[in-house]
Amino acid sequence: MKILLLEDDFTLSKEISAFFTTKGFECFPYYDGTLLLKKYFPYDYDLIILDINVPGTNGIDVCKGIREVDKKTPIIMLTAFSDIEDKLSSFDNGADDYLVKPFHFEELFARISSLLRRKDIPQQSESKIIINDLEILEDDMKIFRSGEEIKLTPKEFKLILILAHAKGKVLSKQFIAEKLWDYHIETNQNTIEVYINFLRKKIDKDHETKLIRTKVGYGYYLSDQE
């Protein structure tokens, strides 16, 4: 297993690399975001770890650049910042997870193991999902409403898929959070409301028939029926 690591703290980078070497991984460290993007080639690595506050191109923009050519390799962000805006920005630009410094290496290992397990599970998908005038092309990661394409971030697209696959069943915020991030994080349940609002503005705002619905006290569901 090969891990690409962007971390400008030389001591921490060495410690992370040494830790994952004991776990059977091979680490490839970079200290500058711009240099990493110049050297990056899609699918060379099994997992990517990016610090946000680094020289050159910051970690969030590095994540965005990688996602333009590589949609699949799991990415986890490391940062000293814990502000919700940093988290949302990371997820909106394609990150799969977010870990705030200082952290325990075993927790980082657990997060990475979870992402790698998900990557290795064969994904059974419906290539096209249609709900009223909403069309979701799962394999192409595209969504249309009334024939017009709607641009979604990776997390927004994953959220609409979670709702669509439920086939009208009401899903709790906790269930959605666990599916969206693969494990429970307390702040994620509040963040679900933010993402639901993002989706409503993009999918429902300009249409008479609303598809993203709330059952008060229970959760959310996707349907053209009350």
Image (spheres, helix red, strand yellow):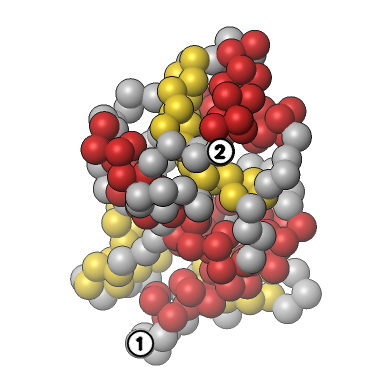
* Camera-nearest residue between 86 and 117: 86
Residue 91, position in %: x, y? Answer: 50, 56
Q: Which residue is mark 2?
A: 9
Q: Give, as a three-letter code, the residue at label 1.
A: Asp
Residue 29, position in %: x, y? Answer: 45, 27
Q: Give, as a three-letter code, the residue at label 2.
A: Asp
Specify whether 136 is left or right of 218: left
Q: Nearer the viewer, mark 1 or mark 2?
A: 2
In the image, residue 86 sits, relative to residue 76, either above or below, namely: below
Residue depicted at x 22% and y 72%: 148
Residue 221, position in %: x, y? Answer: 59, 67
Q: Which residue is mark 1?
A: 206
User: Image quadrant for the C terminus?
Assistant: bottom right
Residue depicted at x 30% and y 38%: 35
In the image, residue 39 sits, relative to residue 26, either above or below, namely: below
Name, please, the residue furthest toward the front.
10
Specify whether 69 is left or right of 76: left
Q: How many marks?
A: 2
Residue depicted at x 42% and y 32%: 30
Few, some or many residues within 10 Å of mark 2 (<14, 14–19, 20+): few
Specify whether 216 is left or right of 206: right
Residue 155, position in %: x, y? Answer: 48, 56
In the image, residue 46 sits, relative to residue 223, either above or below, namely: above
Which comes sooner in the sequence, label 1 or label 2?
2
- Camera sees residue 163: no
Which element carries disc 2, helix, strand or loop? loop
Q: Which mark is residue 144?
A: none
Which element carries disc 1, helix, strand or loop? loop
* Camera-nearest residue between 224 and 143: 143
Q: CA distance from mark 1 to mark 2?
A: 47 Å
- Camera sees residue 210: yes
Residue depicted at x 37% and y 44%: 33
